[in-house]
Amino acid sequence: MRTPPILRSPRATAAALAAVLTVVTVCVGDAVARSYPFGPRTRSVNDLGNQFVPFHAHLWDLLHGRGDGGLLLNWQSGFGTSFLPDLGTYLSSPFALLVGVFPRDRIDLAVYVVTLVKTGVAAAAMTWLLTALRRGRGREWAAAVLGASYALCGWSVAEAAYNPMWLDGLIAFPLLCLAGEWARTARRPVLGTLLVTLAWVSNFYTAYMATLGAALVLVVRLLLEDGASRERLRGLVRAVRTVVLGIGLAAPVLLPVFLGTKHAYPGWTREFAPAAWPDAAARLLPATYGFFSPAVFLGTGALLLACVLAFHRGVPRVERWVWPGLVAVVALSMQWGPTHLLWHAFATPNGSPFRQTFVFSGIVVIAAWTSVARGWPDRRALLGGGGVLVLIAASAAPSALVTRWTYPLFAAGLVAALCALALVRGGRFLALAVLLLVGAQAGQAAATTAYADRQRLKQLDDYAPWGERQRLQADAVAGADGWPRYRTDPGLEQSTANDPLTVGGQGGAYYSSHTPDVTTRTFLALGGGFTSRGRALQSLDNPVTDAVFSVGARVHVPRDPHQVWNRPDDRPVTVTRSDVPSLVTVRPSAGPAQPFGRSPFRNQEELLGAPVYTLPRTVLRSADGAAATDRNAYAYEVRSGTYTLSASCPAGSEVFLWAPDLFGTARLGAAGEPADLRGDLPARRAGMLPLGPGTGRIAVTLRAERDGTVPHEAVGCLDPGRLAAAVAGLKRTGATRVTVSGSGVHAELPPGAEGVAVLAAPRIAGWSCDGRPAGSYLGLVAVPVGGGRTAVDCSFRPPGLRAGTLTGAAALVALLATAFGPAALTRIRRRRRG
């Protein structure tokens, strides 16, 4: 069998070598850090364990026909939420489909492999771009090293490693530059447009930054081009057309994502603060880590070649100044507020504020390739570039980010790069030169990867990979599942904020950038807890809300031992079952429901439709017996220490505590089990918790670990008999049969149903019933019924899907006209002449 020509191409060989070098280096760095899957240390830090792994697990379920819901509607999270915005944000990369070939219980390994593949493809794409900008015959191996240095930049191994969706932007930048190059030279208009579409569908956020960077590269290429201004303008117009059509084709995904962010609960906003210049310089060097500074590390070889460019007499003078000038402009733009906002779509990120760093790294690599594509730099250029690089490294000395490994690694890499370039220019010992450059790049990148792995575990929250705890929890959920007759909640003792996606069930927990505003506010009104400033909702562990949302089974697991604040817990995995109404109930239509008030106990009663709580007067005293002072008219003020909350609950009732701003523990009586509260408003909010049976006069011991508040109406006494009566009433008027799908609900009603049919799902944007927008019943989906009506049909379509589909269709027509229009016109003219 003959080898395909592309595989015999030096460019393709170089791209493949760059990919292999990148993947091997990342694996070596992770192995040195003993990080999963090469050791016992988890790599699931921050949103990787809390969001991305669970979402990929849900994708696995959908691919294998096991998920509750579909591409439009996710029934497993937040008691029903839109899935297309989450799909377009976290899972729309074609590489995400690779998780489907792994076993379900190896989902962490699947996500790691996807991360490796993306990083390797980024290296190959950059290598291909470099050799497309200038062939550099005989020096393709240097392009491979530079392509690997781009994919192994500090931004990739320190930040995108636990945000795998960002790695699509790492791939997008060289691809978009390639599309711009084709537009400049009037080649491959269809393929260039499809590359733009692929980039924007895979991850719109980083694609936006990559598009800005590719535009800058294109402008420089047009300025350096020999030819008339008219030809340059035509190339620019072709590029704009390619981008507009490509984004238009991606509109069916982009518009729902955009509107999903508009309907989301407001996140954390912060002011931009530029990084200190010594810190910025330090991040150019190996073995550094910092959350609020740009991770620009590229390897000493790539940085040396970029610094050499200004001194390289073999490169035309204009190129020797334009490319370094572009590098300087982009570096300054990262530190200036207005351009910072431009890079980030006019919104300062909640987390790392230098997310455009990969674009800067790519431009530096292009400058480095420019210095070797025409010829190897001479001794003068090497001395000049080396001197500049040493000055940059020296300017990083005051930074606290510099470690004891930084300068030794930098010095070793600089010596290796200088020796390699000196050897290759002499035309001898080419193999040794390649070994020096590759070894320096791989060694520094592996060390930086290992150091970043260790530092992330020290500075960020982390989560255990799939193990025995998740297996037991998933088995319990599967054994209790009765969907859609009732919901099964995987429990409040969560391993991640997206446990329903990981272990199954149809719970209330949900964490996403698109957590709907109406969902968060409804949960808060009912006493729910959250983290991440309202976008990570916790399960509502309460009999009243279980009745409202038809949670007929609730799993209880021991507290996650992986979380450092949890106490040892040897409780077995159990399932609590409850008699609950159907997903669709019919409420009387005497008038509009009263809006939610301040008390979650009264709000639960309002949504349930019956009074079930007694709210006693409370007295809060400190350990010395002094009465607690009031923060305001509704809450006590507490400091770190121990307090006693006294109240009276009827015998036979169940005591519930609502202290959303308390960080500590609560215990009912001397023998009660301590309950953890993790309130710290506005970032965290503790949910309402059950404490035990009411016995008349009660005393709740509160241990506050931080300053906070406790509401005056912090205690609610639930009457089980009243709750049972209310549930029985809802069951009598509830739907006799409910059918759910990935896009809606069909409910059959009992004869003579009159009033308002209420679906136990938040009334998020996109719900419609009978062809009209659905109503809202205290935040839940509602539709009037009566007049002999026997069924309710409600459907869900994410906002923006129709407009996005129409826009995509129009862009497709325009692309076809662009591709085939000129040929068709030529044929018509020939026929007329004939």
Image (spheres, helix red, strand yellow):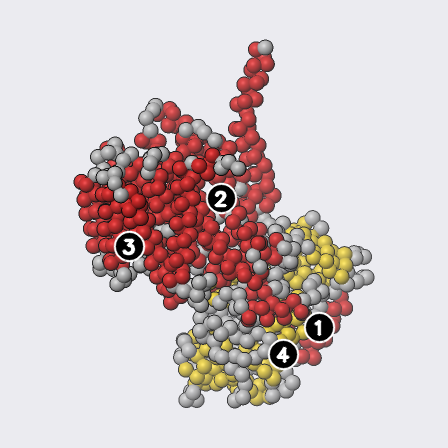
Residue topped by disc 2: 200
Amino acid at circle 1: Asp
Amino acid at circle 4: Leu
Secondary element under disc 4, as helix, strand or loop, is strand
Residue topped by disc 1: 579
Instruction: Using the image as rendered, state which of residue 396 and residue 454 is in the foreground.
Output: 454
**Residue depicted at x 41% and y 75%:** 707
Specify which label sits upstream in the sequence, 4 or 3: 3
Amino acid at circle 3: Leu
Q: CA distance from mark 4 to mark 3?
A: 61 Å
Instruction: Using the image as rendered, state which of residue 587 and residue 423 is in the foreground.
Output: 423
Question: Label 1: few (<14), some or many (≥20) within 10 Å?
Answer: some
Residue topped by disc 3: 285
Q: Is residue 163 visible?
A: yes
Q: Viewer-nearest of labels 4 and 3?
A: 3
Q: Circles 3 and 2: CB distance less than 8 Å? A: no
Secondary element under disc 2, as helix, strand or loop, is helix
**Residue depicted at x 38% and y 67%:** 458
Specify which label sits upstream in the sequence, 3 or 2: 2
Amino acid at circle 2: Trp
Secondary element under disc 1, as helix, strand or loop, is loop
Q: Viewer-nearest of labels 2 and 4?
A: 2
821 vs 795, left or right, is left
Where residue 710 sits in the image (x, y, percent)? 48, 77
**Residue depicted at x 49% and y 84%:** 701
Q: Which mark is residue 718?
A: 4
With respect to residue 176, does 81 lie above or below?
A: below
Specify which label sits upstream in the sequence, 1 or 2: 2
